[in-house]
Amino acid sequence: MAGLGRSLIGLIILGGCCFINGCGSEAEPAGNEVAESHEDLWRRRVPCASSEQCKANEFCTTETGACNPPPGCRPGQVCPTVCYGVCRRSIECRRDRDCRTFSDYCTGCDCRALARGEPDPVCPGPGVQCFVDPCLNQHAVCVGGQCELEPQSE
């Protein structure tokens, strides 16, 4: 019984050390990704602990090894030992022809890059009117498995 108590105390101490050290780790940039500050990461993307917190066509980067501290956790702070990532769109293309542009008039004159099979976004209201097609002089290209916009070459 005493051996079990010592083992349990050892696990609690080890867990506490991991708990405290968990907030200082940042995910290593993979491949051609550029390391960005922790604050920039949360400002631009939706934080998540699992893909269930992301939209239907997205996944949480914790599935690919991201283990960032929770939003608001500062270096040196004691934070929960939950790995956080950000929601990213699932791989949607392999080549440029897998992508298309979509003129989005929902809240402004916006051009979006979508995968060929991805449905057009639905606007909850009447939308806006634009003088020029927002996708004029732009085309969609596949970059790292994601459809992105690029200026049309002359």
Image (cartoon, rainbow, N blue to C red):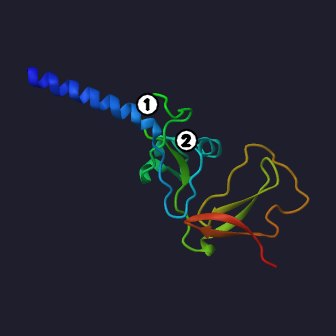
Could you tell me the amino acid type at mark 1? Pro
Residue in the foreground of this view, choosing between 42 and 76? 76
Q: Which residue is mark 1?
A: 80
* Crowd around label 1: few <14 · some 14–19 · many ≥20 (10 Å): few
Could you tell me the amino acid type at mark 2? Pro
From what the image shows, is residue 6 above or below residue 149? above
Residue at 55%, 35% (x, y): give it: 71
Residue sitting at the far front: 76
For the C terminus, give its image quadrant. Answer: bottom right
Residue in the foreground of this view, choosing between 113 and 106? 113
For the residues labelled 1 and 2, the Cα–Cα distance comes to: 15 Å
User: Which picture quadrant has residue 93?
Assistant: bottom right
Residue 31 placement (x, y as % from top left): 50, 64
Residue at 33%, 28% (x, y): give it: 16
121 on left or right of 154 = left
Residue sitting at the far left: 1
Residue sitting at the far right: 131
* Crowd around label 2: few <14 · some 14–19 · many ≥20 (10 Å): many
Residue sitting at the far bottom: 154
Which labelled disc corresponds to residue 39?
Answer: none
The mark total stands at: 2
Residue 35 placement (x, y as % from top left): 56, 53
Mark 1 vs 2, N-terminal side: 2
Residue 128 placement (x, y as % from top left): 85, 49
7 on left or right of 144 = left
Residue at 61%, 69% (x, y): give it: 142
Q: Which residue is mark 2?
A: 47
